[in-house]
Image: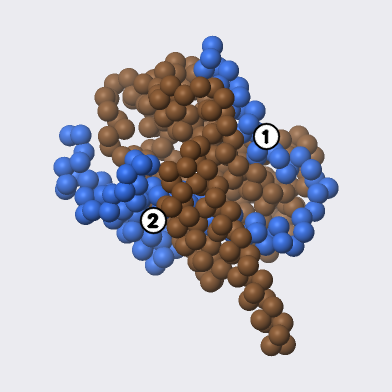
Chain colours: A brown, B blue
Amino acid sequence: MTRQHEFTQGARDMLPMLLGAIPFGIIYGSLAGAAGLSTWQALGMSLLVFAGSAQFIALSLLGAGVGLAVLLLTTFVVNLRHALYSASLQPHVRQLPKRWRMPLAFWLTDEAYAVVVHRYAASDASPNKHWYFLGAALAMYLNWQLCTLVGVLFGQQVPNLEAWGLDFAMLATFIGIVVPMLRNRPQVAAALVAAGVALVCHGLPYKLGLLAAAFSGIVLGVLLERRAQSRVLEVC
Amino acid sequence: MENWLLIAGMLAITFATRYSLFAFPDLRFPTLVRQGLHYVPTAVLTAIVVPGMLLPDGQHWQLGLDNAYLWAGLAAIAIAAFTRHLLATIGGGFLLFFLLRWAMGQLPL
């Protein structure tokens, strides 16, 4: 496929993710004022940080009057999963020059990762898959900025927007990403264990429960995959 | 001023985690790590979704019939399992979520 083709296809494949992110971006924008951010700071955070869940958590901690160091530590922990995404896509972007790798990393979100990882897994040997990545990432970025802006303007007009529960959109999006991946036993087991550990550890500070859960799920998935492999070898 | 400092810090940290492995193009991963990476999205996203359904406010268990996050979430899982269609999952789940909340008088109308 040509570059333009890949680029537009990437943006188009992001459409469902964009719809799922719209309510999320709007609530973020509408809640930012109440948490103490000015309009420019609310927009600036979306433009410069571009990390939905970290931005949300920052708002809730700011509202609770937490200090800068704790806020940054929490950002780090919540964003650690992006290091895993980075590791996962690294074999596909390693041949690209730095001027590609840096912006693509800046735009690497949960949603972009979920879409792009499928494109890289496709069997065709297109040399332009990074244009697909760029199209998907830019679509997400522009969408997020627009939604933040709408939220900031909306939040000044509509009181208690947060009572609508628009945050459910993120759960529905993540469900739509994960469930189709549960195709074999190790994947199902990884999901079940991650869920269980996340529930048991939900009271841990700084979202550490999320990390413990992710780690447990990954370890169990690998263990089961390896056991299945060694069993196949024995049969052979 | 403090807020801009926060934004600058968050920018640095977020970019560092996302760029972490892209920064080393020559690094190759051992098989164990590559296998582990297959389970990253499943484990991370499930660990966000399930507590979001059972403890919507992040602190209190809500297992009752009046928890729309739980029931609409289960419905979204069913839609995703049967259709494998992302948009149907988001649209169907969201619609049901609002219908449930409306029916239970939980919307600020």
Q: Residues within 10 Å of mark 1 (few under 14, many from 20)?
A: many
- Parent chain of label 1: B
Identify the residue at horizontal 17%, vertical 47% (top origin).
B104
**The label number, if any, that marks residue B16 in the structure image:** 1
Find residue B20 and report its horizontal and vertical position in percent: 71, 40
Identify the residue at horizontal 59%, vertical 48% (top origin).
A113
Residue that lies at the very extreme toward the bottom in this rendered image:
A235
Left or right placement of residue A115 versus residue A195 in this view: right
Q: Counting residues from the N terminus, which is met first, the one under dot 1 or under dot 2?
A: 1
Identify the residue at horizontal 54%, vertical 34% (top origin).
A74
Give the structural element (helix, strand or loop) at label 1.
helix
From mark 1 to mark 2, how far is it between C-alphas? 33 Å
Which residue is labeled 2 in the image? Answer: B89
In front of the other: B47 or A114: B47
In front of the other: A112 or B19: B19
Residue B24 occupies quadrant: top right
Disc 2 residue type (three-letter)? Thr
